[in-house]
Amino acid sequence: MKFNVLTLFPEMIEQGINTSITGRAIKEGYISLNAVNIRDYTNEKHGHVDDYPYGGGAGMVMQAQPVYDAYKSIVGEEELKKEKEMRKRVVFLTPAGKTFNQRMAEEFAKEEEITFLCGHYEGIDERVLELIVTDNVSIGDYVLTGGELPAMVMMDAISRLVPGVLGNGDSSVDESFNAVNNMLEYPQYTRPEEFMGMKVPEVLLSGHHKNIENWRREQSLERTRIRRPDLLD
Ligand code: ADE
């Protein structure tokens, strides 16, 4: 999986993704990261990438030209001659997008290459969005200062579904929101058997696999009922 990120803060992306499991996945070649600084592509002599919004209003709007040229530097002229539906996916992170979820992560994980476009200020000139963006995605109903954290959230969720990224000891099957049961994960325990007077549930020490499986299923259901009843509808 190849990730490209168009951003004004490439070092933020690099530091975030080159850490922990995604960092290991990059070292081992399962994923790659190419963070491109939009500012490097501005034609403006003072290095500006934003300007006042036509029609007035607060804040600044990122200009189309540097975004378009940064994108072109990644995909090349040939890609731009294709119909948008035939091109590699370009995800614009915006609170005005479709809400990201595990299903979408599974879909995106099938791609070979994804480009993320991170906005700042009050947005990006609509014309360049029309030209290059294939997907508008939000990570939730709240407003952040930029698209970098949402892009990292998406890359993390997608990466762990790429075969090889999770080591043998890790699992992407049993946890919350898997495609099979759409339920929250059951509680987990490790040593010691007693902590601050609290004991590990007896059934988990029994070695009886069927009973353990049943107990976990009940716990998942109960948890989902209490915390996320909307998932059971
Ligand atoms: N940019 C600012 N807020 C965002 C959000 N909630 N999701 C995606 N991109 C954003």
Image (tube, rainbow, N blue to C red):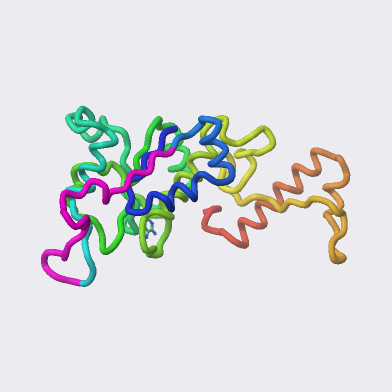
Q: Where on the image, by quarter, is ligand 1?
A: bottom left
- Give the image location of residue 89, x and y in percent: 32, 37
- Give the image location of residue 121, x and y in percent: 28, 63
Residue under the point 34% across and 59% down: 95
- Give the image location of residue 188, x and y in percent: 73, 51
Residue at the extreme front of the image, as rendered: 45
Q: Tell me, yes or no, whether the highlighted magenta stretch contains residue 45.
A: yes
Which quarter of the picture shows residue 87?
A: top left
Instruction: Decide which of 48, 210 is in the foreground and name it.
Output: 48
Circle count: 0
Does residue 141 sit above or below 129 in this rendering?
Answer: below
Q: Does 188 sit left or right of 70 as displayed?
A: right
Q: Does 84 sit left or right of 166 as displayed?
A: left
Instruction: Decide which of 20, 189 is in the foreground and name it.
Output: 20
Q: Tell me, yes or no, whether the highlighted magenta stretch contains residue 22.
A: no
Residue at the extreme left of the image, as rendered: 55
Which quarter of the picture shows residue 113?
A: top left
Residue under the point 77% across and 52% down: 189
The stretch in magenta equals 33-57
Quadrant including the N terminus: top left
Residue under the point 37% across and 53% down: 9
Residue under the point 76% across and 48% down: 215
- Give the image location of residue 85, x and y in percent: 25, 33
